[in-house]
Image (spheres, rainbow, N blue to C red):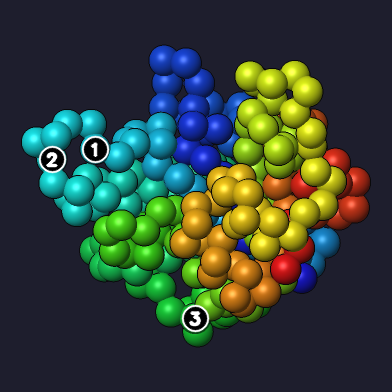
Amino acid sequence: MRILLKLSGEALSVEGKRFDDEVITGIALQVKELLAKGYQIGITIGGGNFWRGRTSENIDRTKADQIGMLATVMNCIYVSEIFRSYGIETEILTPFICSTFTKQFSKDTATACFQSGKAVFFAGGTGHPYFSTDTGVVLRAIEVDADGIYLAKAIDGIYDDDPCRNPNAKKYDEITIDEVIARNLQVIDMTASIMARDNHMPLWVFDLTETNSILNAVSGNFTGTKVTV
């Protein structure tokens, strides 16, 4: 089974620091266990612990998005090194050349990395401005023939309203991508949602902070929300 795991940059950070090594170590150990079981795992990380959109009107949107892409590369390099310290072989693939820091993405390269048992990091988004990391992860999942996308968030699934503001918000155990789009639930952005729908790419949304959340989500004890296509 080949899966893509999407992590937010903020989920990897802790107050006052860009990276929380304890959280990253927990992720690494879970990924290592899944790799040992034969899963093929790709990982995409947002850049929010470094950069979130245009912080100044003086910065052009294209340049702001390019900064965000580079933030995801830095995150993948850092997390990859933590993974390697626990004996996990990794590769970082980007849609643009980063000297010797990464390898340039191609489906063939990604497939070879998966087949050799590496954790494959997809950094740099789509390589183009005006597309989010959400769109990047759906695009890569489609390109590499993944079986599904696992979205690790700071919330335990999808609700019909913001549960922080509305204590009566209803959580969905399962919902179709058409419903997500129609109700504008913003699980992933609209471009990514439409791509997932049109290419029949299912998603699982779960709380990263729960104990063994990734292992549970992938191997059966799933308590989040499944998005069907």
Total count of labels: 3
Q: Residues within 10 Å of mark 2 (few under 14, many from 20)?
A: few
Q: CA distance from mark 1 to mark 2?
A: 7 Å
Residue 143 lies, with reference to residue 68, above or below; the image says below
The percent position of residue 135, horizontal first and vertical second, equals 47, 60
Numbered disc 3: secondary structure: helix
CA–CA distance in space, label 3 to label 1: 31 Å
Q: Residue furthest top?
A: 16
Where does residue 6 sit, x and y in percent of width and height? 58, 51
Judge by depth and name the residue closer to the eye, 116 or 3: 3
Q: Amino acid at mark 2?
A: Ile
Q: Which residue sits at x=77%, y=54%?
A: 175
The residue lying at 31 percent from left, 64 percent from top is: 127
Identify the element where label 2 is drawn. loop
Looking at the image, the residue that sits furthest to the bottom is: 108
- Residue furthest front in the image: 182
Q: Is 46 above or below relative to 110? A: above
Q: Would you say 169 lies left or right of 137 here?
A: right
- Amino acid type at circle 3 is Lys
Say which residue label 3 marks. Answer: 107
Residue at 45% x, 45% y is: 46
Q: Earlier in the sequence, mark 1 or mark 2?
A: 1
Q: Secondary structure at mark 1?
A: loop
On residue 59, the disc is: 2
The residue carrying mark 1 is: 54
Q: Position of residue 161 (x, y in %)?
A: 67, 32
- Given contact means CB atoms under 8 Å apart, are the residues at marks 1 and 2 in contact? yes
**Mark 3 vs 2, N-terminal side:** 2
The tag on residue 110 is: none
Q: Are marks 3 and 2 in contact (CB under 8 Å)?
A: no
In front: label 3 or label 2: 2
Q: Earlier in the sequence, mark 3 or mark 1?
A: 1
